[in-house]
Image (spheres, rainbow, N blue to C red):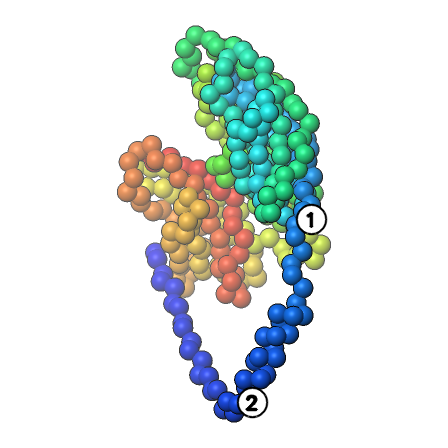
């Protein structure tokens, strides 16, 4: 059920006081002169950011190397990162991005990578420490993906980090990398021999959903692992989390069915907002008797079988504001 949201527009009345024309002119002129004469010019930014640290480079296939690094610092703000291969710039990325894939490389070839930070004034940091990586040898055409990693667990590490663990996937040749996804976006990659990963840069008191995929040298990617949810530790004094819990999404011939447990807010929750692929889709509204336990909602989608959706919810709280988002679920139309 969809409920339109009302928007109210207010137009305040404004009364202008009459000011003698001759008196206003010298006052404005004096103010303008003071601004021009008294305000110091902004200081030129000549300080370069620090060099990125913690740079790693790992080859997950015959033609790809995955490069990651830790954020640099600047007296104002880092605005971009530049990735260099053998001393030649090959990637430029926004400051919020701390990893990238370098593609179209030569199989079984050693490479060296560095990273530099840049600020808004164009100041560039020194190069990071150089890190080597050798692409894997090319193999016969491989069309078989690995199996999905199993038993994924996510453990919060304070309010801004988490540790993921899983059991290894299997492949007819060899698993060369594991890709970590958060909300259906890849955020981390580790080697094919790893069964753990540490994720940083999270927000306190927030619900996250992680999945892991295995990849082989031919870039075949496994299905998603089962999702693992976690809620990071709240900051001191922060309010309790208000996210719906235990969200499940199931595709049927009639559409997509969601079931979940509304948050405990001290009152009956009558409304939830549904988001599909990170965009608001509709408001789910119950009448006088909303569910007291598990809630269920089924909706249809016009897309063809195989279409992939990410789904999440949030509840309307007793004070009229919207609460925290639930963990996210991915579902494929059948």
Tell me the residue that label 1 is attached to: 75
Q: Which residue in the rendered view is the most extreme toward the right?
A: 236
The residue positioned 65% from the left and 23% from the top of the image is: 131
Is residue 79 shown to the viewer in this render? Answer: yes
Pointer 2 local density, CA inside 10 Å: few below 14, some 14–19, many at least 20: few
Q: Position of residue 128 (x, y in %)?
A: 67, 30
Q: Which picture quadrant has residue 156? A: top right
Q: Secondary structure at mark 2?
A: helix
The disc label shown at residue 23, or none: 2
Q: Residue at x 43, y 41 (%)?
A: 310
Q: Is 69 displayed left or right of 287 in the figure?
A: right
- Secondary structure beneath dot 1 equals loop
Which residue is at the front of the view, 160 or 55? 55
In the picture provided, is 107 more to the left or to the right than 235?
Answer: left
Q: Nearer the viewer, mark 2 or mark 1?
A: 2
| Quadrant housing the C terminus | top left
Nearer to the camera, 271 or 81: 81
Q: Is residue 258 visible?
A: no
Name the one closer to the observer, 286 or 67: 67
Other-residue count near label 1 (Cα within 10 Å), few / some / many at <14 / 14–19 / ≥20: few
Could you tell me which residue is drawn at 40 percent across and 72 percent down?
8
Residue 304 disc label: none
Residue 208 position in % (x across, y down): 56, 42
In the rendered image, the vertical position of residue 284 relative to residue 219, given as above or below: below
Identify the mark nearer the N-term, 2 or 1: 2
Q: Position of residue 99 (x, y in %)?
A: 57, 33
Q: In the rendered view of the protein, which quadrant contains the N terminus?
A: bottom left
- Residue at the (42%, 12%) spot, across then down: 142
Q: Are marks 2 and 1 in contact (CB under 8 Å)?
A: no
The image shows residue 327 at horizontal and vertical percentages of 52, 44
Judged left or right of residue 334, residue 173 is right
Q: How many labels were placed on the picture?
A: 2
């Amino acid at each position: 059920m969809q409920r339109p949201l009302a928007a109210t527009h207010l137009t305040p009345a404004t009364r202008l006081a009459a000011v003698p024309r001759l008196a206003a002119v010298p006052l404005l002129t004096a103010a303008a002169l003071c601004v021009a004469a008294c305000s110091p010019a902004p200081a030129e930014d000549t300080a370069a950011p620090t060099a990125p640290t913690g740079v790693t480079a790992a080859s997950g296939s015959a033609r790809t190397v995955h490069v990651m690094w830790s954020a640099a610092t600047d007296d104002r703000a880092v605005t971009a990162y530049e990735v260099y291969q053998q001393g030649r710039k090959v990637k430029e990325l926004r400051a919020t991005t701390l990893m990238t894939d370098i593609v179209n490389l030569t199989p079984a070839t050693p490479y060296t990578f560095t990273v530099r930070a840049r600020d808004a004034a164009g100041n560039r940091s020194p190069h990071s420490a150089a890190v080597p990586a050798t692409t894997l040898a090319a193999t016969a055409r491989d069309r078989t993906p690995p199996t999905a990693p199993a038993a994924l667990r996510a453990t919060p590490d304070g309010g801004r980090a988490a540790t993921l663990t899983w059991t290894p996937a299997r492949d007819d040749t060899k698993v060369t990398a594991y890709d970590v996804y958060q909300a259906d976006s890849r955020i981390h990659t580790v080697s094919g021999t790893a069964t753990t990963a540490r994720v940083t840069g999270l927000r306190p008191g927030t619900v996250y959903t992680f999945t892991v995929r295995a990849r082989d040298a031919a870039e075949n990617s496994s299905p998603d692992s089962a999702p693992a949810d976690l809620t990071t530790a709240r900051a001191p004094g922060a309010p309790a989390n208000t996210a719906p819990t235990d969200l499940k999404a199931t595709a049927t011939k009639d559409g997509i069915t969601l079931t979940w447990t509304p948050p405990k807010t001290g009152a009956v929750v009558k409304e939830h907002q549904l988001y599909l692929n990170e965009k608001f889709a509709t408001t789910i509204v119950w009448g006088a008797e909303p569910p007291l336990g598990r809630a269920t909602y089924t909706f249809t989608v016009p897309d063809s079988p195989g279409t992939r959706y990410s789904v999440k919810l949030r509840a309307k709280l007793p004070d009229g504001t919207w609460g925290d988002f639930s963990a996210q679920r991915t579902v494929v139309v059948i």
